[in-house]
Image: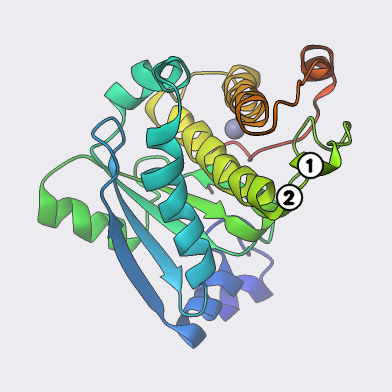
Amino acid sequence: MLVKSIHGRTETHSPGLLWRFYRWLRGTEQILVRPTRELPLVLISFAGGDDEGVERLRGALEETWPTLPDSFRRRYTPILSDAPPLVVVLLRRRNICTCLGHHHPHGTESRTTRRLRNLSGVRTGELDLAFEAIRDWEPLPLSHLALPPEASTAETRSFQWQLALLAVLLHELHHLTNPQEHEHIVRKQSQTFYEDVLAHYLSERFHVEYGLQRELRHEVTSEIGGEGAR
Ligand SMILES: [Zn+2]
Ligand SMILES: [Zn+2]
């Protein structure tokens, strides 16, 4: 690995030399999450000490997703029905390349995923998510719109974090199941999903209207993830 980096061939994308060392130093743990039937079975692979990220991702899959109105969840039905029944999520704090996540095309997955695929005999996909980067991501429209004080609570921030994890996960699953789809289409769908769910939540929970979101949607430049994993 070192020789590879000395010769200037270090991969900046997952898993990356530093990530491999990080895992080696801290050890890796895994947890299986069984969300509702529409979502794949998810194996979260994470480094020791990253339990908060695991809890948030688990919350996104087991708590946030099932409470969303059907009309929001149905937007991802075509993608989810094509998704692999088993998905390994390599959860980390941040990516060296600063992306929020990546999908890992067939043939580029980690040994864990390949082993799991052989063991289970089912189609198994892999992606990575950077949970702290996703928490700090201020996609929209909150970075533009000041929330009224009554809606600016720890509860809202917690909801946003789990929703953002969900949106990035769906974004990467979209790439995984539909590799030909152009980035701008994939991104538009996940960002619209994020915005609409957040607007719905704020209106239900705090009776706050989100009137500017339609206009702001056209100004979006945030990047969710690079193309391909490595
Ligand atoms: Zn990247
Ligand atoms: Zn993308």
Q: Position of residue 116 (x, y in %)?
A: 21, 57
Q: Position of residue 47 (x, y in %)?
A: 47, 74
Q: Name the residue rendered at 83%, 19% in the picture.
A: 216
- Ligand 2 closer than 8 Å to label 2 CB: no
Q: Which mark is residue 153?
A: 2
Instruction: Identify the amino acid type marked 1.
Output: Glu
Q: Position of residue 183 (x, y in %)?
A: 61, 24
Marks 2 and 1 sit apart, C-alpha to C-alpha, by: 7 Å
Q: As displayed, is residue 192 above or below residue 20?
A: above
- Quadrant in the rendering for residue 200: top right
The residue furthest bottom is: 25
Q: Which mark is residue 76?
A: none
Side (left or right) of 57 relative to 211 = left
Q: As displayed, is residue 22 above or below residue 111?
A: below
Side (left or right) of 184 relative to 215 = left
Could you say whether the residue bearing mark 2 is in a helix, strand or loop?
A: loop
Cβ atoms under marks 2 and 1 closer than 8 Å? yes
Instruction: Identify the amino acid type marked 2.
Output: Thr
Could you say whether the residue bearing mark 1 is in a helix, strand or loop?
A: helix
Which residue is nearer to you in this view: 144 or 15? 144
Residue 104 in view: no
- In this picture the colour scheme is rainbow
Q: Name the residue rendered at 81%, 29% in the picture.
A: 221
Q: Nearer the viewer, mark 2 or mark 1?
A: 1
Q: Name the residue rendered at 57%, 47% in the picture.
A: 101
- Badge 2: residue crowd in 10 Å (few <14, some 14–19, many ≥20): few
Q: Which mark is residue 150?
A: 1
- Quadrant in the rendering for residue 28: bottom left
